[in-house]
Image (cartoon, rainbow, N blue to C red):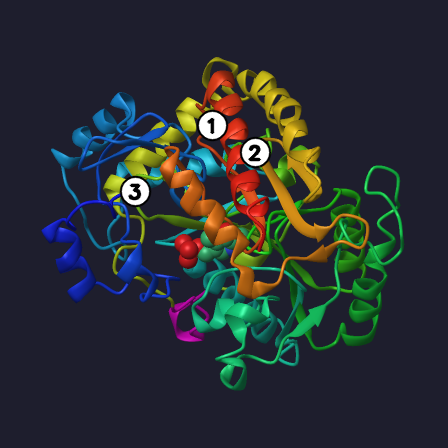
Amino acid sequence: MNNLDKKPDIDLVRDFHSVWHPCTQMQDHETVPPLLIERGEGVYLYDRDGKKYLDVISSWWVNLFGHNHPRLNEALKRQLEKVAHVMFAGITHQPAIDLASNLVELSPHNLQKVFFSDNGSTAVEVAVKMSLQYWQQTGHAEKTRFAYLKGGYHGETLGALSLCGLDLFRKNFENVLMQNLEVQGPDCFRCPYGLQPESCNAECFEPMEKTLAEHKDTLAGVIVEPLVQGAAGMKMYPPRYLKKLEVACKLHNVHTLYDEIAVGFGRTGSLFVCGEHKLNPTFLCLSKGITSGYLPLAATLTTDEIYSAFYGDFSTLKLFIHSHSYSANPLACAVANETLAMLTENNFLKTLQPKIKALGEYGKRLEQLEWCGEFRQTGMIAAAELVQNRETKEPFPFEARVGYRIFLEGLKRGVFMRPLGNVIYFIPPLVISVEEIKMMMDVAVDCIKAVVEEKN
Ligand SMILES: *Cc1c(COP(=O)(O)O)cnc(C)c1O
């Protein structure tokens, strides 16, 4: 196993003493300590012993251009020589001004204003609070609830968690969450209508249509992860659903909140899903890839109409009172500007096409495994949902820890892939090569076989 065979590193002992890691049953680290990563280079991470690991999930979906990238390093150093941080009320700076205008230019034309914060959850909180206050200030104080999709994930602070359609994250806090409306959304693998995503007409929009019609008077907005529900296990659905959503929300006077925190910045093959499909959300939440995984930063984009409802004489007290100490951190903004330049120069997104093709082609090996219930792909994101029985789609039991054991097999083979339950997924840095994609898929097949053929 990775670093079990020898005496544990003293720093790993110290880690175990003092560190509480996110989303981790700490007891697991009694037997399998975390990787002690010393450096990164391109798509690889290197541990203290020099062993390298392919960063298959882009360090929690944030990294686009690989680790230790000379251009991003340079942009960061240039800004570091000037100023590392200043508050963002009463003060502004060039990196933020550039970033806001870049984001406005690259996003759908209806989005004209950018509000900065420092992580994905806060980007969502900002959109939610802006939406609520907008309705209050325009004579609709009764609009206080949001509709969200089953399986949706929008962060884990309490406000964001109130929009989360995953029991695993919610259940311990259910008693204190905002009273929002959970709506059955797309579920293409287990489609209740028995249809195929290639040919359906997003019949699954029906429950949302009903919710909107019935609750429009109290609904402030609808939040979705466009095309890919990440934390649900990279569940994917066709853009038709989003077109219907946009039409219905307009009709019923309800805001659309697009959470492109995971799918934005090239992951689907285009810069933003909403731009690619000509959608005009009321709010667009961005984070993760915005700094290519260098520093925490987030942006909530919105329309002039929303902005105008807050604009006026100071005595009206219509301002948006929301602030984070590290809003628009200059170092982060500088790296974000460089990231955007790299994404938009030299037809970078076009260079993804052969990789997207390779992901699908080598993914076929996974698809052919008898435990692969579904192999799915949207651009540079791919996932294999493992099941016990392909016919009935019966999942592996929770207790078997199939995903976790596959993760451990991956570590042995120098691939860091951290599954979501029994979904093995791939969201590699965009700079991964076709050869590395092949290697990643081959290793995934080996790991799955090693675990499942062992017999649970
Ligand atoms: C990761 C994620 C968030 C939360 O971002 P954090 O920076 O982890 O708070 C919100 N929405 C989506 C879709 C995400 O993938």
Nearest the eye: 140 or 381: 381
Residue 208: % across, % down: 79, 63
Which residue position is annotated with label 3?
Answer: 2
Q: Secondary structure at mark 1?
A: loop
Which residue position is annotated with label 2?
Answer: 445
- Residue 157 vertical placement versus 1 (above, below): below
Q: Is residue 430 left or right of residue 273?
A: left
Q: Which residues are magenta?
A: 312-321
Among numbered discs 1 and 2, the one appearing first in the sequence = 1
Residue 280: % across, % down: 67, 45
Amino acid type at circle 2 is Val
Residue 109 visible here: no
Q: CA distance from mark 1 to mark 2?
A: 21 Å
- Looking at the image, is mark 1 or mark 2 nearer the viewer? 2
Residue for point 43% across, 42% down:
409
Q: Is mark 2 within 8 Å of ligand 1?
A: no
